Image (tube, helix red, strand yellow):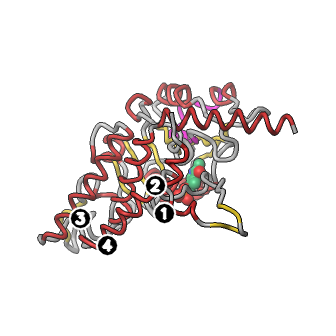
Amino acid sequence: MINVDKIREDFPILKRTVHGKRLVYFDNAATSQTPQIVIDTIVDYYSNYNSNIHRGVHTLSQEATDKYEEARIKVQHHFNAKEAYEIILTSGTTNSINIIAAGFASILQKGDEIIVSALEHHSNIVPWQMLCEKTGTILKVIPMLEDGSLNMDAYHDLVNEKTKLVFCNHVSNALGTVNPVEEIIAKAHAFNAAVLLDGAQATPHIKPDVQALDVDFYVASAHKLCGPTGVGMLYGKEKWLQKLPPYEGGGEMIATVSFEKTTYAGLPHKFEAGTPNICGGIAFGAGLDYMNAVGFDNIASYEHELLEYGTQRVVKN
Ligand SMILES: *Cc1c(COP(=O)(O)O)cnc(C)c1O
């Protein structure tokens, strides 16, 4: 069970007042508040070992590199990815989706089809429209039923040999619908299409297992998981991450450079050009630790209690 009073104490922002009243914060789906342990992690980074990673040979750089790579492993374990290098640390869900969309722009051909659900966040629609304009790929949409669920009969009719990719929310940001992702993935895979799940709204409530789901790509943002803004993750199956070209050129993502030819670094660095959000990545790990310490089963059962309470009050009044 959850001790709500004790959890409240973990969030210093809840001590402030707004319009003379104690803060009540309901906008967690847009961004969650930050527990003291994550704030402490950020302060500790800038107070004690702020430095650039992967390149430096000095103590601070080695400490920062170790902590950053530990954070990657925390994300790997949280999502049950097979390999740590299948986790790309990005600036958030939007950035993760754009990396995949840009990669597929060089794989897709005119006449190929991609499928997106009608329940998507704008960040999961616009990159695909941009991609279709560039490649001549056709965008198909899974329609929604009146009860807010996806029309799965229509989905089964949409998938065919031309389908190359299916993109879907794991949980909808608009309605909270939990989509039948296993069914979506199984059907897509039967036609050799890849599946990307947008986990930005699922991850605060569910601990996804990317291997059990057998999903090809999974993306999420730290700031909806008690972590800081400006950092997120992209899980990709190794075979897909090998296949997709890098997103940005720059430092960190190259192995050797000359004006004749540049060879790219291996995973995950191929997709992590430039100096990353080092502090953010480490604090992302601290946010996941915090949520796991509270426990996803505890979170789910408390949320269910709140939902029943809220629904009753709305129906009664
Ligand atoms: C919040 C959200 C995004 C975008 O996340 P950013 O952190 O703003 O990049 C994408 N998809 C869904 C479902 C979201 O809830």
For ligand 1, give the image quadrant. Answer: bottom right
Please tell me which of labels 4 and 1 falls first in the chain.
Answer: 4
Please tell me which of labels 1 and 2 falls first in the chain.
Answer: 2
Say which amino acid is labelled 2. Answer: Ala
Query: Which numbered marker is on residue 46?
Result: 4
Asked if the beta carbon under badge 1 is closer than 8 A to the nearest atom of ligand 1, the reply is: yes
Circles 4 and 1, Cβ within 8 Å, touching? The answer is: no
Q: Position of residue 171 (x, y in %)?
A: 59, 40
Within 10 Å of the Cα at label 4, are there few (<14), some (14-19), or many (20+) other Cα atoms?
A: few
> Split into 4 quadrants, where in the image is the C terminus?
top right
Q: Position of residue 11 (x, y in %)?
A: 50, 57
Say which amino acid is labelled 1. Answer: Thr
Please report the residue visible at 39 percent of the width from the left and 61 percent of the height from the top.
Answer: 247
Give the residue number, with chain letter if any, for mark 2: 222
Query: Which numbered marker is on residue 64?
Result: 3
Query: Which numbered marker is on residue 229?
Result: 1
The Cα–Cα distance between marks 4 and 2, rounded to whole angstroms, is: 19 Å
Say which amino acid is labelled 3. Answer: Ala
Please tell me which of labels 3 and 4 falls first in the chain.
Answer: 4
Magenta residue span:
157-169
Image check: 229 left or right of 250? Answer: right
